[in-house]
Structures are given as C-alpha cells and as structure tokens.
Image (cartoon, rainbow, N blue to C red):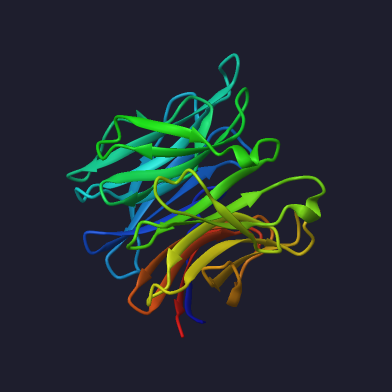
Amino acid sequence: MKEIKLTSIWQASEHNAFTDLTRFNEAWWCTFREAESHNSTDGTLRLLKSSDGSRWQDMGCLRIDNADLRDPKLSVSPSNQLILIATAYYTNADPKYRQTFAWRNKQGEWSEPTPIAEQSHWLWRITWHQDKAYGLAYGTRPKNGLHWYEISPSLDSYKSRRVTEFDGNYVNEHGLVFDEQGTAYCLLRRDITPPESSTGLLGTSKPPYDQWQWQDLGFRIGGPELVWAPDKKTLLAGYRRHEDPSQWLPQWTEIAELSLAGKVLQSIHLESGGDCSYPGLALDQQTLKAVYYSSHDGHCKIYCSDIEMG
C-alpha cells in the first residue's frame, strides 16, 4: 500500500468537509459539505465530477431552506441512477430535529429530496445489494438506539429494525459492504465512557441481518468507510484516528487493509491534521482513490489521494 498521488481539489468555502466518492458512468463523483465551520448550521452540499480523477468540474450545490445539510453520501442504484443522501438538521424548528433525504440524478438534474428514514433517525449511508439498499441509522433526540434499514429500489418505502445489543451505548457512523453470498461486513464507530473503550468494531451478519458478531479493532475511529480490496479477500477501510482517544486532537486520516476478522494488515497515514478525515473510497482496478478533508495547513480543504495496492 503506497500513496502515488495527492492533490487538493477544493477550498472555496470557509469549511469544506465530510466527503464521499463514487464511480458513475465513466466518471468520478465527489460530494462534501460546505459551511462556515464544523458545527455551524448553514451546511450545503457541493458536487464535483472528474473524467480522469485529476481535473475536477464543479457540478453545483444542493441546499434546503432553513436546514443544515450534513454528511452527504453517494451511491449508484441497480437501475444505474446516481443517488445522493444527506441528513438535514432543522435548527429553527421547535423542537429541533433531523431528517435524512435522498436525491436522484436524472439526466444531469437532481430530483427534489425524498425522506428515506424516520424523523430523527440519522441514516448514515446506504449500500446496495441485489435490488435493495441497506444501512444503519442512529437515533438523535428525542430518539435513540441503532437501527438496521432495508430500503426499496425506488427509495419510496423502507422498514427498520432496532439493533438491540447496542442499547445503552452510543454507536453511530458506519461503512458497509456485502460479499457475493450476501454476508454483510460493517465498520462501526462508537463513543462511550470511558473514552479509552470507544474502540471501533467490525461486524458480520448473514441474511436476514438480524444477528451480528462484532470484533473489536482496538482503537478509536470516526467517519468510517469500507470497500473491498481488489481480490475481495480483505477489506479496505478509511477513518479518522486519534492520538489520544480521550482528546479531539491530534487526529489524522488513515487508510488500512483489514482482515475479515478485523485485524489491521497494513495501513498508511495520509497527509492530514487538525479538523480532518471522513474519507470517501472507491477502487479503480489496483488503485484505491480516497477523498477526504483536512485543515493541517490552516484552511479546511478537500484532498484526493491515489493509493497503489500491493
């Protein structure tokens, strides 16, 4: 595993962060949140497109009036539609609440947003397997708990089930992949007390995904993403690492190869620091392309890294 190329691809806003990446119709698509700061309530969603992975074209911005849009995620549906999901935080409502929406790209234009989860369930991302989308949502006030979602191909209906083994613990962001037999692998963030116990988990489950087995990574993570390695025998993971699990800083962006049992086989530390990470990953033959954000040079920028596998 060796980084062969690193470029800064966007820095127009005060805070550019929380990235994702996918390959769609022979082009790379990248999305991220633009805002005044990490915790401000003015988030909008920027989209970039690249035919060669080097030169990026601005494809515009999505927004919802009176809502802070956070953590956009991209996927491609079985019908070959580009799908974007994100969670809107309505800070002016009484009480405040969150709603996850989906947009479809139709002939270059984005549809109106459609709710795809219960109100106050933060559906972190969706991953397609066969003809359905799956993902984990974590409850936000006034709700709580972790919930497994199964969503129809048209994104107009869903059903959810509580993952009860995490009741009483705060688990949230995740990455998810499926193998050819339908087994799910989930990289999960947790934030519990004491912070030294806030280690990431790798879970596995077979259909109908009502029972999970979890392996402890042994270190704290944030903003996880997961894709298959080229031979589909190991997993490639991206996440935020902390030098001290009880402290916000220092932190950095790490890319790792994981065994199916959650062991780190090799890893690299991408150039990053300060407020950073939340990578998006996509594989191009033997090269892993990673987008992420970092403020290590004083301004929160979007970066793109090419990593040669081997």
Q: Position of residue 61 (x, y in %)?
A: 38, 42
Furthest-top residue in view? 94
What residue lies at 67% left-to-right and 40% top-to-bottom? Answer: 170
What residue lies at 41% left-to-right and 57% top-to-bottom? Answer: 183
Furthest-left residue in view? 107
Q: Nearer the viewer, residue 258 or 71?
A: 258
Image-based side of 78 in relation to 127, left or right: left
Q: Nearer the viewer, residue 261 or 244?
A: 261
Q: Nearer the viewer, residue 2 or 208?
A: 208
Q: Position of residue 220 (x, y in %)?
A: 70, 58
Q: Position of residue 246 (x, y in %)?
A: 81, 53
What residue lies at 80% left-to-right and 45% top-to-bottom? Answer: 193
Q: Position of residue 230 (x, y in %)?
A: 38, 76
Q: Is residue 23 visible?
A: yes
Image-based side of 51 in relation to 20, left or right: left
The answer to whether 143 is drawn above or below residue 134 in the figure is above
What residue lies at 32% left-to-right and 29% top-to-bottom? Answer: 157
Q: Nearer the viewer, residue 34 or 308?
A: 308
The answer to whether 70 is drawn above or below residue 119 in the figure is below
Q: Is residue 38 visible?
A: no
- Give the total of numbered labels: 0
